[in-house]
Image (cartoon, grey):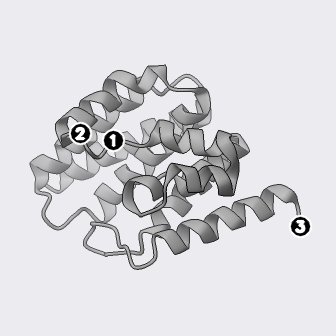
Amino acid sequence: MSSHLAETLRAAVFAARAHAGQTRKGAAAEPYVNHVLEVAEILAAHGAPQAAILAGLLHDTVEDTPITPAELTLAFGAEVAGLVAEATDDKDLPKETRKALQVSQAAKKSDAAKQLKLADKISNLRAIMHSPPRNWDHARRCEYIGWAGRVAAGLKGVNPGLDQLFDATYRDAVAHLAQHD
């Protein structure tokens, strides 16, 4: 087995254990790990660096589980842990501040972190279309899609395939909401 494959599967198992019992906010209540697997698959399918793929699997562990940055560094090295940190919001800040920082800081991220954030937004837009959170009305979904577009504007330019996938997903999300208002 290639070392990249083994490392990727190790990160997938780590993420699955970290997110055990967690579900997405959507009506389908799918296992949370499906999201991080999708993010990693998007990155792998578009030629992102291995560290970004691993960080895609692990990107929500520090935000949403008891896993610490030190544990990630020990398990996956400083590069992967650094990418996770770069992609992680500070949950101590108010939600609106975190959202504003994602827009203002997007263009300042490393190339690998930009790809990770873009893949995360693609996955989230897909979820908004297919299984939105139960308590999100039409206006809330529209607001999220617009905000995701503003974040993505600062992330583009690194990976043309990801840029195109985001644009297509964004258009699909807008069209979907226009049909389901």
* Image spot of residue 65 (x, y percent): 41, 63
Residue under circle 1? 90
Question: What is the C-alpha distance between the residues marked 1 and 2?
Answer: 6 Å
Q: Inspect this view and state whether residue 82 appears.
A: yes
Amino acid type at mark 1 = Asp
Near mark 1 (Cα within 10 A), the count class, few <14, some 14-19 or many ≥20, is some
Q: CA distance from mark 3 to mark 2?
A: 42 Å
Please give left or right for residue 70 compared with residue 145 in the image: right
Q: Residue at x 60, y 68 (%)?
A: 14
Instruction: Identify the residue position indicated by label 3 in the image.
Output: 1
Q: Amino acid at mark 2?
A: Leu
The amino acid type of the residue labelled 3 equals Met
Looking at the rendering, which quadrant does residue 137 occupy?
Answer: bottom left
Q: Of marks 3 and 1, which one's residue comes earlier in the chain?
A: 3
Can you give x and y, in whole percent of width and height, for residue 60 in the image? 45, 55
User: Considering the numbered disc 2 on the image, is that residue within a helix, a strand or a loop?
Assistant: loop
| Residues under numbered marks 1 and 2 in contact, where contact means CB atoms less than 8 Å apart | yes
State the SS at label 3.
loop
Q: Position of residue 87 (x, y in %)?
A: 46, 40
Query: Reading the chain from its start, which is encountered first: label 3 or label 2?
Result: 3
Residue at (85%, 58%) from the top-left corner?
3
133 sits left or right of 42 in the view? left
Quarter of the picture holding the N terminus: bottom right
Quadrant where the C terminus is found in the figure? bottom left
Is label 3 or label 2 in front?
2
The one of 99 and 134 positioned closer to us in this rendering? 99
Res 159 seen here: no
Instruction: Identify the residue shown where x is 20% and y is 42%.
Output: 95
Where is residue 126, by image quadrant? bottom left
Please tell me which residue lies in front, 2 or 72: 72
Task: Identify residue for label 2.
Answer: 93
> Dot 2: within a 10 Å radius of its alpha carbon, few (fewer than 14), some, or many (20 or more) residues?
few
